[in-house]
Amino acid sequence: MAFARIIRQNFHNHPEVASNYTIEEKYLLIGLACSADDFGKQWNNEANIKSVIFPTDDVPLKWVRETIDKFIGHKILCLYTIENTNYIHFPLWFEEGWFLKQRIDHPREYQQPDCPECNTESKKWDELHYSRVTKANRRYEESM
């Protein structure tokens, strides 16, 4: 997992968030962003999600499931299935101006399979890898 996530200043007053979600739902949304891999993907299992985001809180699994389904319905999350396992990801993870953002300086290989519809990782990996190689080459050239 990445070590940092960016929650933009417009998160709390963004119309998509402010008018649709309770404080608890916003907290879950931020927790999902923190627990996602570098490409915004994670296993869609409410028990696992609850244990990561609300480890000691008395949060009903039903509420976690219903809230995730709400995010999927609002297209904050995208649901996909690979080999009978459900996953979710943030389809706008790398979009400029979106209220949750991931910036990757040192991309890691994916932990979860890529969404076959969005192909977020396959679209972004070459760009990120190229950027990393370019930075390394530039540092090497500067040291000479």
Image: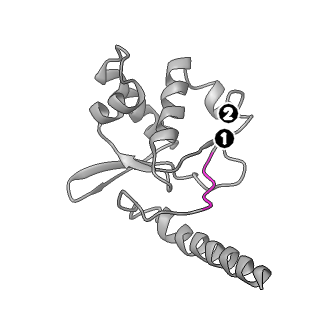
Circle 1 packing at 10 Å, graded few (<14), some (14-19), many (20+), is some
Q: CA distance from mark 2 to mark 1?
A: 5 Å
Q: Position of residue 76 (x, y in %)?
A: 52, 42
- Count every numbered label the image shows and give the total: 2
Q: Which mark is residue 11?
A: 2
Image vertical order of residue 82 relative to residue 44, above or below: below
Q: Position of residue 114 (x, y in %)?
A: 40, 62
Which secondary structure lies at badge 1? loop
Q: Which segment is the magenta one?
A: 101-105
Circle 2 packing at 10 Å, graded few (<14), some (14-19), many (20+), is some
Image vertical order of residue 115 relative to residue 58, above or below: below
Quadrant in which residue 64 is drawn: top left
Query: Quick check: marks 2 and 1 in contact, CB under 8 Å?
Result: yes
The outermost residue toward the front is 144
Compare marks 2 and 1 and give the one earlier in the sequence. Answer: 2
Q: Quadrant of the C terminus?
A: bottom right
Secondary structure mainly formed by the magenta segment:
loop
Residue toward you, 89 or 111: 111
Q: The disc labelled 2 sits on which kind of residue?
A: Phe
User: Position of 112 compared to 83: left or right?
Assistant: right
Residue pictured at 48% horizontal, 65% vertical: 121
Q: Position of residue 116 (x, y in %)?
A: 38, 64
Residue pictured at 34% horizontal, 49% vertical: 87
Q: The disc labelled 1 sits on which kind of residue?
A: Phe
The outermost residue toward the left is 84
Q: Which residue is mark 1?
A: 99
